[in-house]
Image (cartoon, grey):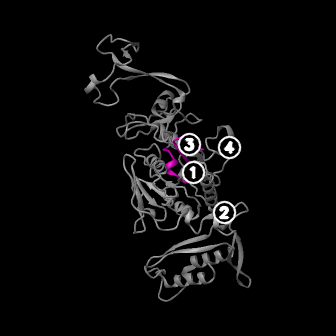
Amino acid sequence: MNKSNKTRIGHLAGPTATIQNTPPLVTSNKARAKRGLPLLKDADGAPLRHDALRPQRLAAAVKVYVEQFSAHPLESDVAELYGPPDGYIGADGVLREQRQSASDKPVYEIELKPDDGLYPLPYMATQADGSAWEEECTAPGALTGRQGFFPDGSRSFEEIDRLSIGVEGTASLLSSIATVDFYRGVPPGGYTKGLPAHLRSDKGEGDIPAEVRGTHFFGYKPYHLAVGPPRPALAKATNDMQALVSSGDYDGVIWTQGSPQVEESAYWFNLLIDTTLPICGNAAQRPQGQISADGPANILDSVRYIRSRVWADEQGHNRCGVVVIQEQQLFAAREVAKVDARPGGYVAAGGHGGIVGNISHTGRIALTYLPVFKHTHRSDLKITTLPNAVKAAKKGPHGIEMVEVAVKDRNGKLLADAIPVVTISADGSYSAMSYGHDSAPEIDLIASIEHKLSLGLLTGFVIQGLVPYGRTPSHTRNKLMLKAAFSGI
């Protein structure tokens, strides 16, 4: 039994997630000056005025002295409302209880401790050869370098909790209302040398073996090393999500992924995951820590949404389906679409609603629309009711034959080969090269049909056709699509 008043949340990490990424760690000018390295310069050739402050951990406690009235330029305007400082520091740098001269600065004494958590500090690291870090890689285009993506959500949530400031001027925005457990799922970052079990920050068990980019983790930076997740990764994400919502340990789950693809996974979970709990998808257009980063607020809004229980019907079951929460809007998973690469770049594409609700700047949540589409526990496609095997068309020596395709294993988990191989086809007008029905230029579509019929798997096409006719602009390609359909694709 959960005796805490805090909401219990599971976080499942998804691939290529900007919301779980950071700007490159660049060697500060403090470190460059210390080591005699070329300084970062501004447009006039002068050293940059400020170093980027990156969240880091203190190795030992330290006392610092902060000048009174330096948090805001108008604090001193009402100095009479303030209590006394902890002391005064003169030109000699010594702290005294009483002011010795008019130039002494009133200060607060603060002891910073390692267990306080992260502190924003200049980044002092250099490369092994003594040169400065300028980007993720050791040099532009190099195959060696670092990762900006997190291996699980724990560091991202920690930074939000530690460094983000709420409307009321306080921090601990997440930990004050929720407990979060982190699961790696299909993470954007990984441990290329492995990780001992006692150092794990996620809920997994045992040592993490050495991981390979493109097999165990999937990030899009450095750009020349970008990798995307294959079909087996979707099966793993599905099984991991179903396990989380079925565990009984959580009040809801948050899924984070790259901003162009979060809508696809949310739609998929909406169809396949059998749960009465809320599932929230989050993405970001800007990495965490970058100017005007949008990810932290989206994550906080998901926590608030799960905690609010506005999603629950009279039986306490989720009535909204999977939602994607972006920029204070709650989008229905089946209708959300990214249309622009900026904060606010998501719309409801269905044209008949799609925005389930909104979240005010103070965190108040209101529902404005409930989807009537079947979803999650109401879905006819939920994983718990899918058949263990189905038939698929395959081209054999004597024509089209039907073969069996396993859908789930003996434990009810989705198999990667059960996910249909689908081609999305879109054609513009005037696409035919000449009059008539010459199929020779359509070699790509012909090859795709032949390939699908050779697999012995579930296959299909999604066609962006003409409204309301449902066919492609090219009559030749439309005939080929009909052939595919009558071949069992």
Residue 81 located within the stretch drawn in magenta: no
Q: Mark 4 to mark 1: distance in Å?
A: 18 Å
Asked whether the viewer can see residue 138, the reply is no
* Residue under numbered circle 4: 194
Mark 4 vs mark 2, foreground winner is 2
**Tag 3 near tag 4, CB within 8 Å:** no
The mark that comes first in sequence, 4 or 1, is 1
Q: Is residue 191 above or below residue 467?
A: above
Count all numbered tags in the image, as a single digit.
4
Horizontal side of 393 relative to 461 (left or right) equals right
The mark that comes first in sequence, 3 or 2, is 3
Q: Mark 4 to mark 2: distance in Å?
A: 27 Å
Q: Mark 3 to mark 2: distance in Å?
A: 27 Å
Residue 13 is tagged as 1
Decide: few, some or many residues near mark 2? Use Cα within 10 Å; few <14, some 14-19, many ≥20.
Answer: many
Residue at screen point 57% across, 76% down: 444
Name the spot of residue 455 as percent of width and height, x first. 68, 73
Residue most toward the left?
A: 77
* Residue under numbered circle 2: 414
Asked whether the viewer can see residue 160, the reply is yes
Name the spot of residue 49 as percent of width and height, x first. 38, 33
The mark that comes first in sequence, 4 or 2, is 4
* Residue under numbered circle 3: 154
Q: Amino acid at mark 3?
A: Ser
Q: Mark 1 to mark 3: distance in Å?
A: 10 Å
